Image: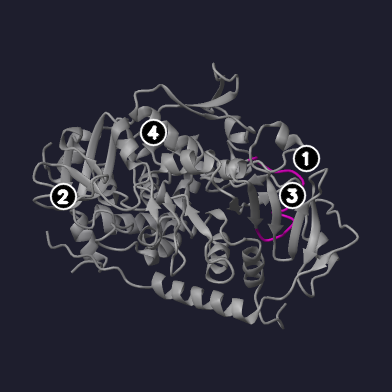
Amino acid sequence: MPLLPLNEAIATHVNDGDSVALEGFTHLIPFAAGHEIIRLKRRNLHLIRMTPDLIYDQLIGMGCAARLTFSWGGNPGVGSLHRLRDAVERQWPQPLALSEFSHAELALAYQAGASGMSCGLMPHHADTDLARVPGAALRTVRCPFTERLLTAVPAINPDVTILHAQQIDAEGNVLIRGIVGAAREAALAARRVLVTVEEQVERLRADMNAVVLPSWLISAASIVPGGAYPSYAQGYYARDNRFYLAWDEIARDRRAFTAWMERHVLGVPDHAAQLRALGVAA
Amino acid sequence: MSARAYTPDEIMTVTAARQLRDGAVCFVGIGLPSAACNLARMTHAPRLVLIYESGTVGVKPRVLPLSIGDGELAETATSIVPLPEIFAHYLQRGRVDVGFLGAAQIDAFGNLNSTVIGDYAHPKVRLPGAGGAPEIATYAREVLVIMKQTPRSFVPRLDFLTSAGYLTGSGARAASGSPGAGPRAVITDFGVLRPHPETQELELAALYPGISVDAARAATGWPLTVPGHIETLPAPEPADLAVLRDLEARTRAAHARPVRINLRN
């Protein structure tokens, strides 16, 4: 597991046209890695994430994405993701194909992918329109034991899963603490796994049942303090709810969005410089 | 309503909180549901078990989270489980008593749309989407819906069925095999709607003080059935309002706190 500068890790492991899952449910969202993808101008990505959040709003608005697989596409507690809406409603800056699920289905799809299954199964009840949209991926099958109807959700195996985590130890093992979302499943489902971490420590002081990704599962890691900002890293810094509220106004207008991205992402060399420019870090 | 000592959001939140019995296991959404559940926990239902879809079980937040996964939830949880588990082991397995949902549109049978306004492929408004709602609507033993009542949101026909209520009514939901009973009450800024015991069509059941039946009818996009007896709900108790306003003030202060990151490495 090589420790690489973030731009080198992304340049090596994220290619145009890849399916890419930046996971982390509200917590530990790998913003720094997403911004590096934008700086490297990757195109035609198939973005996968349960909650696209601001980072996918940014990737979509900057023209990196051709397809989005997701289960809830809003700004949590605030409202719309305006760039996602603009892409779906008005094809700006380019059309965006959608593969849409519920949270339970998408979590199951990662778990199936992580288990080497072609699909995951859940009980089938009332059909919702999600099962009826053009290209819907859900199918019903019959349980061979009980004859009950089951819903089959196709497995998801991203080309690359990118996570942010708290710590990496001297051997390259990675610890995630707090809300873990489907991070573990998304990583185990992927062909390649990139990790950014808050810090390197000699030894992880993890509880016995903690979520630790062993070094040999990880393709490359980068040390990026603040790498989840404006989401958060439990034990390091809080979610910047003020930024999430402010993003509503920034992203509502194409020009304001583009100007913000040019100044704070394209116009800075790395995440540390961005955090300093935003006044979040000294 | 201007002369009243409370806002529409406040009476909705207090009314919704009163629907929750102590000790119930409640799957909570962000916004008014989260405010109502925590108000209940801080007043009459101290043993209410709150689960948020971020995998946080038994949370006791001191301030309301802005997102479904704020650190406040993790820090005050009994346990934090991965997402496949919160949906499979808790919700799907039937361990949730009450699911609390909002939506952009609701129809007369309590079916919900949180996906699109207009056609799916060419939407007029792309809404955030399903999240946990379809499975909450299916598996929670009962569902409470909280949303503002307008002809645009209380519609004769949904643009998209995201989460099932009573489907076409008269037992259609039970016939589909859904384990949960469906929406028990819809709490609005006018009062409360409940399903008819047989047809399962939502009917006006209660109004807030000073709200007329005609006003509630005018705010509904389908011909709202009004039974002979309509309960008048009490105004919020000053003590409940004090707890709610205190919680919201603490929340505003917490969300305004600047974040500082140490780049020591």
- How many residues crowd around disc 2 within 10 Å: few (fewer than 14), some, or many (20 or more)? some
In the rendered image, is residue B179 in sight? Answer: yes
Chain ID at mark 2:
A
Q: Amino acid at mark 1?
A: Gly
Whether callout 4 and callout 3 share a subunit is answered: no
Whether callout 2 and callout 4 share a subunit is answered: yes
| Cα gap from disc 2 to disc 1, whole angstroms | 55 Å
Q: Nearer the viewer, mark 2 or mark 1?
A: 2
- How many residues crowd around disc 4 within 10 Å: few (fewer than 14), some, or many (20 or more)? many
- How many residues crowd around disc 3 within 10 Å: few (fewer than 14), some, or many (20 or more)? some
In the rendered image, is residue A18 in sight? Answer: no
Marked residue nearer the N-terminal end (2 or 4): 4
Of B68 and B230, which appears nearest the observer?
B230
Q: Amino acid at mark 2?
A: Leu
**Label for residue A110?**
4
Of A15 and B50, which appears nearest the observer?
B50
